[in-house]
Image (cartoon, rainbow, N blue to C red):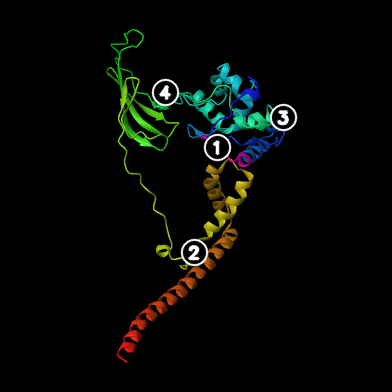
Amino acid sequence: MSPGSKKIFKAGMENKHYPAPLASHEDVVNNPSVFWDTLRRFHFVMGTKFMIPVIGGKELDLQVLYVETTSRGGYDKVVAEKKWREVGSVFCFSATTTSASFVLKKHYLSLLYHYEQVHFFKIQGPVSAPAVAFPLSSSPSKTELAIVEYSPKPTRDCPDPSTESSSSFSAKGTIEGKFDCGYLVSVQLGSEVLHGVLYHPDQQDLSKSTQYDGAIVPYTPGRRRRRRRRCRRSGDPSYPKPNRSGYNFFFAEKHYKLKSLYPNREREFTKMIGQSWSSLSAEERMVYQNIGLKDKERYRRELKEYKDKLKLRQEAMEVEPNIKDQDVRD
């Protein structure tokens, strides 16, 4: 299918056009810094959300995914020739990641497909859709679920679906818990009970019990807990800003530098900064501790001024009714 025959997809992108390439395909393949810089800028220009996915507790290397996919002809060709498992073999996922092909295809479509069109195929003009839309759904009322990880248990006697007739074999699944993007589930296959995780790619409302191919999955929505926000003195904007320790100032300084050097390793910053703080000499650490002491003095001074102003305000409020009473008597 030629690029011009592809249809526009995804609501809100009908009027968008591809920008000019930010670098050549050879540069983004051979230079990781160029790839990450151009990818972030591309999503910024397109106005699309960008974040680094995490699979099996590790950040997905999007450059490797881009290189492996484009070396096989791009997204459409990999889908048509069913080579996602071949692409996923490069990442050496853990044995419990049972749907690597599904997850890689999903993340590539949302984060790299349009980038590929501009930098690999050098397409210009309106935003285009892949030859095969993803995800596909045979029925709009059903929600697509993908099993990502599972916790295997010792195998017991369990009926084999290949030897049993379809009428005698049955499976029943139940949701045991819910998190942001999926469910903790248990599935009973005859006498065997399996426990695992269902990844939910489309966040739809499942306020009613839904039946998935013979497995009844009840769901009872609960109240979502809201994180309490820390506020200054019940929202008083004049309340002084709390002081920070010397380590807080050191942390802020190092975090700013690390973010510019390693933009895709933010999860490791806390550990790296802690090690840097431990390796400082007493003299170097004293510099930041003195800054912390000065900030502490600033906080005490501003807090005293705030309390004095508050006391004067309260006294003025107490005097005002007395003046009004005296005017009434006169």
Where residue 307 sits in the image (x, y, percent)? 42, 74
The foreground one among 96 and 146 is 146
* Marks 4, 2: nearer the viewer: 4
Q: Is residue 18 positioned above or below 325 on the image?
A: above
* Residue for badge 1: 12
* Marks 3, 2: nearer the viewer: 3
* Labels 3 and 1: the sequence-earlier one: 1
Residues marked 3 and 1 touching at CB (< 8 Å): no
Residues marked 3 and 2 touching at CB (< 8 Å): no
* Labels 4 and 3: the sequence-earlier one: 3
In which quadrant of the rendered image does the C terminus lie? bottom left
Per the rendered image, the range of residues in magenta is 43-53
Marks 4 and 3, how far apart at CA: 42 Å
Marks 1 and 2, how far apart at CA: 44 Å
* Residue 319 lies in quadrant: bottom left
Q: Is residue 192 left or right of residue 49?
A: left
Name which residue type carries label 2: Asn
Q: Is residue 186 left or right of residue 83?
A: left
Q: Which mark is residue 215?
A: none
* Marks 3, 1: nearer the viewer: 1
* Labels 4 and 2: the sequence-earlier one: 4
Q: Which mark is residue 243?
A: 2
Q: Residues within 10 Å of mark 3 (few under 14, many from 20)?
A: few
Query: Can the viewer see residue 193 in this picture?
Result: no
* Residue 185 lies in quadrant: top left
